[in-house]
Amino acid sequence: MELFFLALLLILMAGALASGYPVAFALPGSAILTIGLAAASGALFAGDMDAYFHSGGLSQWLTAGVTNLRGIYWEVERDTLIAIPLFIFMGIMLQRSKIAEDLLVAMAQLFGPVPGGLGISVVFVGALLAATTGILGATVVAMGMISLPAMLRNKYSVPLSTGTIAASGTLGQIIPPSIVLIILADQLSSATDQASSARKALHKATTGELSMPSAFDVTSTSAGEMFLGAFIPGLLLVGLYMGYILVRALINPAAAPTVPFDAKVTGRYIAKLCLTLVSPLALIFLVLGSIIGGVATVNQAGAIGAAGAIIMAGYRLKEGGKNAYHPAILALISIGLAAFALLNYDMNVKNIQSSNDQTGIWIGAVAVVLLLISLTWSSVRTYRIQNTLSEVMLETAKTTSIVFVILLGAAMLTAAFRAFGGEELVKHFLEGLPGGFWTKFAIVMFVIFVLGFFLDYIEIAVVVVPIVAPILLADPNANITAVWLGVMIGLNIQTSFLTPPFGFALFYLRGVAPAVVKTIDMYKGVIPFILLQLAALGIVGFYPQLVNYLPNRVSLLSETAPPPRNPRLQVCLEDHVDQALAKDEASIQAALAGVRAVDLGFLPNSVAKDLDSVLMGVESSFTLIDEVKLAEQATVDAGVDYLPLHSDVRGIQRRIWANDAEVEQAETEIARARGDEVVIERAQQRIAELQRENDELAAQIPSEWNDEYAQFTEVLKAESKARATYRRSVDGTWDALASLQAIALAGDSYGNVSSEFEPLVSAVTNDSAEDAMAKIESLEQQMRGIAGAEKIGSLLGKARRALKGRKADPEKAKELLLEAQELHGAGLEWRLKAQQELSTPLENLAATVQFTIGLRQQPKLGKDEALFVAGCLSTHKNVGLNF
């Protein structure tokens, strides 16, 4: 029966959407009606309200609804969605203040003389508006009202004109900041958690191990990473659009003729042009640059954008009036003061230690006050002039409310879909497809593309993504990143704005286009751009580095970068070390020779042995990294023949596990039947059928599977052992080298305390116990701070404790002090000689191997290492053979 109610859920949703019923109410309404009918039918016909649910029941669905409501609106940790109203406000404010219009006119004049220049300028402006507004309707309407008449007046092809404007207006959905990307990041964050649990369960089922190595886990994403990941694909799409228009103009000049530059070039014209271009570009730099540079989070960048839009609108709405630019100038002064203070002073209010620090704080305070005055001044202007601020806030509230209500409704619909077993059906269908991950991925992309003909981007993002994303992310064979999947879905969803019959960009353009433009011409015009979007989708799918590299680069170069010991980085680090050791072998050998050239006979045996083990460890690292690469290649070679068998058997086993899940469901139905013989008999028949199918499936597993699996497992273990041996060796070598270097550099510090031992012996006799203990403790702390003098510090500690309490023993304290003095004297000569002769060679050796052998022990990656690892992590590496 749950399949009946699942079908009813989908029919109700499709019917409500097709009838034009508001999406915000169609999604939750379909869920509530279906859940209510299922619960009522269960209570009426089976005596159990949960009888017709696949899993859980009415109470579990209600709990999920409350959880989703709390998650969207009340959880402090889930603050990603706060950026949505901020970016909406920024976009609407820039559109209402005519800044977008000024940009279009200026760029059309600049690009006009180029073949297809007017069309190229529309694409360029569309990209700029996308990076400043991200509001599709505002962008398409603005460009349709301004550019379309100009393109038609200059005899541009009608389909090319409409297609260019409609496609350029959709760039705001993939070029950050984008509401689509924020919503996708929010949906993917929970999908990642589900995928991680599924992958861990798969690893346990296939290997029998209780824990999965963290290097195999699914990596999550955030709105900031989505923005970074979509940046290059967005530019790629802009380049494809421009290239198409240019080629079209060169092949058929009549379709996109050049437009002569008719404006008179004067100083005033150049100044106005610079102001028109620089303001949006500066806002883009502030918003995206702050995110990319790690200066601000997405929410903070949204606040920067909203504030910048208010200031820009403040001078544009009063253009030509008295004091029009004064608030903007005041804002620039405040930003300059703040930058000066941050660069030259410690701006931590809690850490004020001097008058210089106070000066910096006062400069920062003045900058903040000036910025507040500028914002208040600009806000008052936008409020008074044409009531702009009130209208923008009202539109922002409406749009934001619609988005959030749709999010909540979609969460309720998804919970209902899962309650009736829809997610299990989708999962079993996708996993049953031949061809592995890429077949599943292609089917999902095709479904999203088709849905784009009928549904809005928000509906697709919040309904489809939570269902399919966990399945795709959990697959270890592709091991894709969440940010790549999000950008791919975002690029795919973008086509929904152009595909008839419900392409929203076409609707917006139709509303402002003159009567001479026919709807069929608009449909013809968008077809090439839809194909270009699909081409971009294919390019990004084939080269995941276009998405993954920038987020990885920013993450590894940021102040909060993961340490080199992070398990996810190890394979890439070893690839880097392999290349670096080969490149630096001559310099490393020279540094080793420099240490060996020193006559080490003066060193104690223990120190000499430690130094010898360090030198051997450095030399052996070349062999160990070679063994790692050989073991890695052996795994690759063995995997070529093993992979087909592994894929076939794991496919059979997944079907067996799916049947086992259905058996558990049938057993649950029997438990709930309460003596209903019809239900019990049907469930028992289903269990028997599934068990027979499992027996048949088990018989299909080749007889050589166990032996082949055992052999390949040994190959994997050999690789893991080689990597573990290498890591232990280099870590131990670097730690020992660092310790020896510290000892060699501490000769003077060691010698400076020689005269402090003798007074302590007399202090034990002549001073009070408290005074003597204080003096001993002072020297103890000094010795514990000197590398290699820990044993002397320990003797001093024992001497101090011997004077403590009722059982104080001054004689024992003297003996311990004399022993410490003797031990110190024995080490003084060789330590001073080590500082003189050995410190420089050891320092050279440490500097030579710091970012190879010592790389794992560094607090963070160097720039070169971070860039290498970022590129290495940007490709998707198949880890399926480990499952």
Image (cartoon, rainbow, N blue to C red):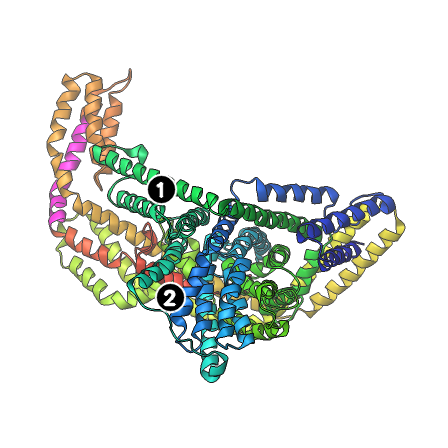
- The residue at the point 44 percent across, 57 percent down is 99
Write down the residue under mark 1.
Answer: 371
Real-space CA distance between mark 2 and mark 1, rounded to the nearest whole angstrom: 60 Å
Whether residue 683 is in magenta: the answer is no
Residue 30: x %, y % from top left? 73, 51
Residue 238: x %, y % from top left? 46, 68
* Residue 544 shown left or right of residue 609 in the figure: right
Residue 189 visible, this angle:
yes
Whether residue 822 is in magenta: the answer is yes
Image-quadrant location for residue 546: bottom left
Task: Identify the magenta region.
Answer: 815-836
Of the numbered discs 2 and 1, the one sitting upstream in the chain is: 1
Depth order, front residue of 131/737 = 131
Write down the residue under mark 2.
Answer: 627
Depth order, front residue of 531/866 = 531
- The residue at the point 36 percent across, 52 percent down is 558
Residue 413: x %, y % from top left? 68, 51
| Residue 157 sits above or below residue 223 on the image | below
Q: Amino acid at mark 1?
A: Leu
- The residue at the point 88 percent across, 48 percent down is 676
Q: Amino acid at mark 2?
A: Glu
Q: Residues within 10 Å of mark 1 (few under 14, many from 20)?
A: many
Depth order, front residue of 451/123 = 123
